[in-house]
Amino acid sequence: MVKSIQEVVPRIAFGGDYNPEQWDEKVWLEDAKLMQEAGVNLVSVAIFSWSVIEREEGKFDFSWLDKVLDILHQHGIGVCLATATASPPAWLSKKYPEVLAVQENGVPYQPGSRQHYSPNSKRFRDAVRLIVSKIAARYQDHPALKMWHINNEYGCHLSECYSEESLQAFRKWLHDRYQTIDTLNEKWGTNFWSQRYNEWDEIQFPVNLPTFYNPSQKLDYKRFMNDAIFELYKIEKDILREITPNVPVFTNFMYEFKPLNYFEWSKEMDLVTWDSYPDPREGKPYRHAMHHDLMRSLKNGQPFYLMEQVTSHVNWRDINLTKKPGEMRLWSYSTVARGGDGVMYFQWRQGKAGAEKFHGAMVPHSNDPKSRTFQEVKQLGNELNKLDHLAGSKTNAKAAIIFDWENWWAVELEGKPHNKLSYLNQVYKYYKVFYEHNIAVDFVRPTSDLTNYQLVVAPLLYMIKNGEETHLEQFVSQGGTLLVSFFSGIVNEQDHIHLGGYPAPLRSLLGITVEEFAPMSDDEKNIIVANGELFETKTWSDVIHLEGARPIATFKEDWYKEKPAVTFHRYGQGNSIYIGTDPSESYVNKLLEGLFQQLEITAPVESPANVEVLERVKGDNIYLFILNHNEDSVTISLDNELTYVDCLHEKPISNEVTVGGTDVAILSYS
């Protein structure tokens, strides 16, 4: 039986990607000693090592990796051993050009970068099976091995392939899904524009078309590519599970990554990990905070690892700003506060060659242990070593936001009433209010268990699959509060309209029907009136008819003026709210503030602006994080009936705590 993460690494993991193959052997021992000094306890090794492990087909050299793992183990450093499949060697694509992915225009990609493989190539899959089997067999009993790091950032640069093998695989996927060509024709609505198919081999990729593509076909192609890349992951996982049944496996996810359905992927992972690179120009990184919460939610609140971040600056933006002193540490603690049990970096030592040589690292080019970068790394690593007792603690949220990858794919396909809708921007708009009010929030699917939540928000839930409306009705009827935004409940899983009046599957729950949509042009705005106050709105307006609901805001202008813009409906023991427009942040903030007050959903403690406050719970112990994003210090009042312990300074605290600018306090109490 596979070990839990807490059994394998019973502490807060700290370290990063380590690429010893890029350095002379004499550097390896120096690295291990510096890692010890910095408090490093876990590193990822061999992520991009295929070409130096299998230098020619079937000829393997593990001598260098043997030495590296031995050195790390001798210095008390665990290893996430990678399967080395993230970038295939040049000899593979030269000998077997069919492994190369093909662009939409039919031109194959070339080696010389990374991720140039086709996930549907049988030859590539065979090569993957061989190298993964060899690595797993060799290191299955090595004491340094803690976890398996499968591939790296699947789909990051290449999430679609248009090779002949991919086309054959697509047709097979469709056959497996629909069984008969008649069923496919029905599900794709092919009587439109005479698109009907008689044979499976008549089906092509949805590319190079003279005008609009079939949205059902495009949606299925996105599902197919997600599944094809997922199969590649599972090939590796199955091999590792057979050879090392006790060793946890994972692959690292990414920020704002649309092509892969991470809720489905996480089911096959023992640990959710992801890579986060906030741009310092964004200021307070609430978007990345949202993705921390999303990653924590993928496995029902199980703590995650931040597998990659940067100490100072990246190399791939137009301008790569450096994190100011203290920011890296503060943002790292935001990771821990939101459920992270691991804080890792790309990478350990700053590279001397290649495309990422200017990407920051734990050890900079100067190799100076007194450098600001290394000193901040060392401070954080040694502080985290004091927080081992916090590992495994959870977040208790009373609110949730519905997030669905297939809905994301569908709502942003072309041919909509408004073709500039951004699913993520709508999610961010609502999440930001939770963030700024320090209200813990989980992310859920429409079919998730909502029992423990008082408030659920569903932004732009365009796609409602069969039965999902019943699940939402049950939540509200049993006392929950559901907030639904505009353009929700419009289509089924094939992107076909739910007939019976918009939003047909939600009409009863919301107590409304939408007669028609009235999208706005880029520079157009309207005003909504709520309790005598005026709020700006843009992008979209619904023409709403009440069917039991009552209006709580109305439009002030245009041909639909005085009609409902926002509605409230009592349903069973609970309430539903529908927002039929895209209102200003000030309105969303005011509406949610009212719901927080009504439902008695509160922050752990009151705090000034730009101060994150979160809690994690483990048994009877509660860990309170206070993260000050201001340059000046802040003083936070505490419950005067409780005695707190400052976890970083190991001293008691009562009544209040002062947190310096760009600093953090972590207090425990029970």
Image (spheres, helix red, strand yellow):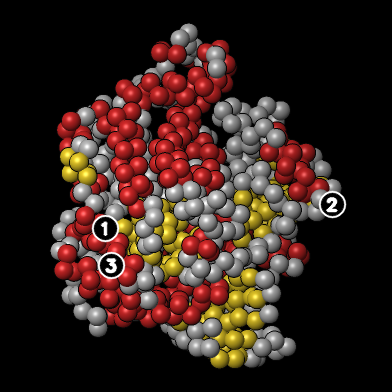
Q: Pointer 1: what residue?
A: 66
Q: Give SS at disc 1.
A: helix
Identify the image quadrant of the C terminus: bottom right
Is 501 left or right of 288, judged from the image as shown? right
Residue 591 in the image: state x and y as whole percent: 67, 61
Q: Pointer 3: what residue?
A: 71
What's the amino acid at mark 3?
Answer: Ile
Q: Is residue 515 above or below residue 450?
A: above
Cα–Cα gap, marks 3 and 2 = 62 Å
What's the amino acid at mark 2?
Answer: Gln
Which residue sits at x=60%, y=37%? 463
Looking at the image, is mark 1 or mark 3 earlier in the sequence?
A: 1
Q: Nearer the viewer, mark 2 or mark 1?
A: 1
Q: Give SS at disc 2.
A: loop
Q: Nearer the viewer, residue 540 or 111?
A: 111
- The quadrant where residue 540 appears: top right
Q: Pointer 2: what residue?
A: 573
- The quadrant where residue 55 appears: top left
